[in-house]
Amino acid sequence: MEDDPFLSHFVRQITLNEIKMSQKTIDKIKSILKVLYQTRINRNSLESISFQGIPDECNGLRAFCWKVLLGYLPEYTSKWKATLDMNRKNYENYLHDYFLPRFKMAKQQKAKKEASKNSDSTLQKEEIKESEPSGTNQAGTTKKKQLILESEGVDHPLSREKNSTWNNYFKDQELWEDIEKDTKRTRSEMDFFQKPTQYPLKYINDVCIREENDPPETHSTVLSRILFIYGKLNPGVGYVQGMNEVVAPIYYCFCNDQNPLFIGHAEADTFFCFTHLMGDIQDGFVKKLDNTEVGIQARIKNLNELLKKIDKQLWTHLEKHNVNPQFYSLRWLMLLLTQEFEMIEVFRLWDSLLSHPKRLDYLNYVCLAMMEGVRDKLIEEDEFATLMETLQKETNVDLERILATSFRLYKQYSKPEDMVYHIVFPS
């Protein structure tokens, strides 16, 4: 194992930090490494161990396990290197095909705006007249000039043709601005996402030349790029506000991985892991699916019905005071509870969610466990405003207790055919 290029980093971590680790932690790390060292990973074993929490003390271990749990790294360990090489090259191609054209056009637009400040005002007026025809003759002249430009291979800025470079640029720029507006305020309580990237993607440095006066690239910009590529490759889903909160824990986790084989590749690896995760939850982001059996309203309904089954008194109390489950659970279910906990707690919570083969079903039990933690207070309250405040601000007090309760509820109420028996629940 010491000679394994993927696992030797973790062996060194045990050696370097053994004094700081409890024997229980060391044993858990070794149990995980034993599973990862096999020719073919026993997914059930990895899920069972990871479900109970992946040790924080071993740098990069969580990032590695998440890559396996999300299906980014295949079960056959001999395919790991080829898979990483192929996907990182694919991501480079995505950047070239989808990001680079927008980047170059944005640079050109910026340069033109700066140049126009010193240009002749008369010339500016003439250009405005050409682009904004006021009469039939002027319109004909403008159309004629546009046809001439297009016949010469110049794509006119006013063109709305589907294959128009300018038309596509304006659409891409709108998408980028929508994404950037959200990524800039991702995890505002942390300064990490506003810091410059320590290991900028080599491809971006080589191809997307940055000027001396350009601000340094921040981690939030990387998030924007990941989500932009995802939106371009998945037009049926596109980008929806909140996706930035889902991708953030993955990227932050991967950026803190000091395994030499993964340093500098957080962006590409995050993109593919995020894409795998979105395969499970993307229907909740598609508005036209909201009222279907796979949309977010169906998921809210399932949670509400489970609450009614498990705690009829609390369900009745909330119904009586018009506390619609959508008011408090929409964010929980869409964003996998990322906004309810601190980042380190999200890591622990996601260890369990990503390890569960039916992670969205299990998410319901975690949500109910959160409500169970403030049940007595909810029952005593009779005002809509105070009930909502409790549900939105006081359900995240004790994560370990929430997880223990969710374990118990799942064991007790999950249907026999849905029970995942290989998961070892803590006592």
Image: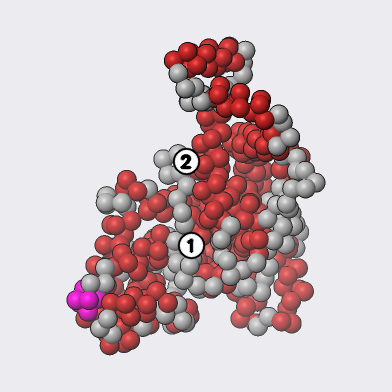
Q: In this view, does 324 lie to the left or right of 45?
A: left
- Position of the N terminus, as image quadrant, is bottom right
Provide the residue span drawn in magenta.
315-321
Q: Position of residue 136 (x, y in %)?
A: 44, 15
Q: Is residue 97 magenta?
A: no
Q: Tell me the SS state at disc 2.
A: loop
Look at label 1 and name its amino acid: Leu
Q: Position of residue 32 (x, y in %)?
A: 60, 67
Q: Is 313 in front, or is 45?
A: 313
Q: Does the magenta stretch include residue 320?
A: yes
**Which residue is disc 2 drawn over?**
234
Name the residue: 56% across, 56% down: 183
Q: Tell me the SS state at disc 1.
A: helix
Q: Where is residue 91 in the image (x, y as percent from the top left)?
A: 62, 41
Look at label 2 and name its amino acid: Asn
**Which residue is disc 1 drawn over?**
354
* Residue 338 appears in view: yes
Name the residue: 31% across, 87% down: 376
Q: Is the magenta stretch mostly helix, strand or loop?
A: helix
